[in-house]
Image (spheres, helix red, strand yellow):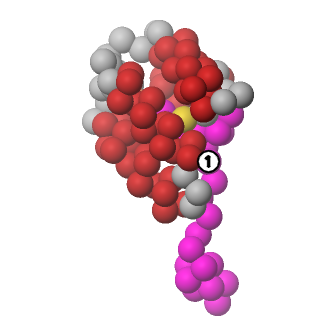
Amino acid sequence: MNHLEAAAKRRATARAISAGITDAACGGLGEWWSTREALLADAKSPREVAEAAAPAIDICHHCPEQAPCAALATTGRYTGIAAATVYVAGRPRKQRQPPAQQQAGAA
Ligand code: SF4
């Protein structure tokens, strides 16, 4: 699947799982949201993931629909940004700690 096909699939999945959410703070931001998720898909490091997702996550933090959105992201096996979380196939993406934090935590 090429980049354009992947983006189209992400948009279709997002529309399908959010169809029942009526008061979404991201309403009307579909193209912008897809751009953030394309940047997220291209991210090569935890820092790039965080930078790509941050603007959308900020919007989620002001959304009254986080709970149903999270449930739909899980059941819909969503990959992208939903409910202030980066999901991969319906599960929150695991964050890798930078080496300095791993060393501090290991002490
Ligand atoms: S929690 Fe985020 S992704 Fe979900 S409906 Fe609200 S703004 Fe959109």
Residue 71 at least partly seen: no
What range of the chain is rendered magenta? 81-107
Vertical placement of residue 67 versus 100, above or below:
above
Check residue 100 for magenta coloring: yes
Residue 63 shown left or right of residue 70 in the figure:
left
Q: Which residue is drawn at 43% across and 48% down?
A: 52
Q: Out of 55 and 61, give the one closest to the viewer.
A: 55
Using the rendered image of the protein, determine whether residue 35 is visible from the camera's viewpoint: yes
Q: Which residue is drawn at 48% across and 25% down?
A: 69
In the image, is residue 28 above or below residue 61? above
Check the image and report above or below for 44 versus 35.
Answer: below
Residue 8 in picture, x, y percent from top left: 56, 20
Q: For disc 1, does the CB lie below 8 Å from ligand 1?
A: no
Viewer-side residue, 21 vs 39 = 39
Most foreground residue, 30 or 60? 30
Helix, strand or loop at mark 1: loop
Residue indicated by mark 1: 93
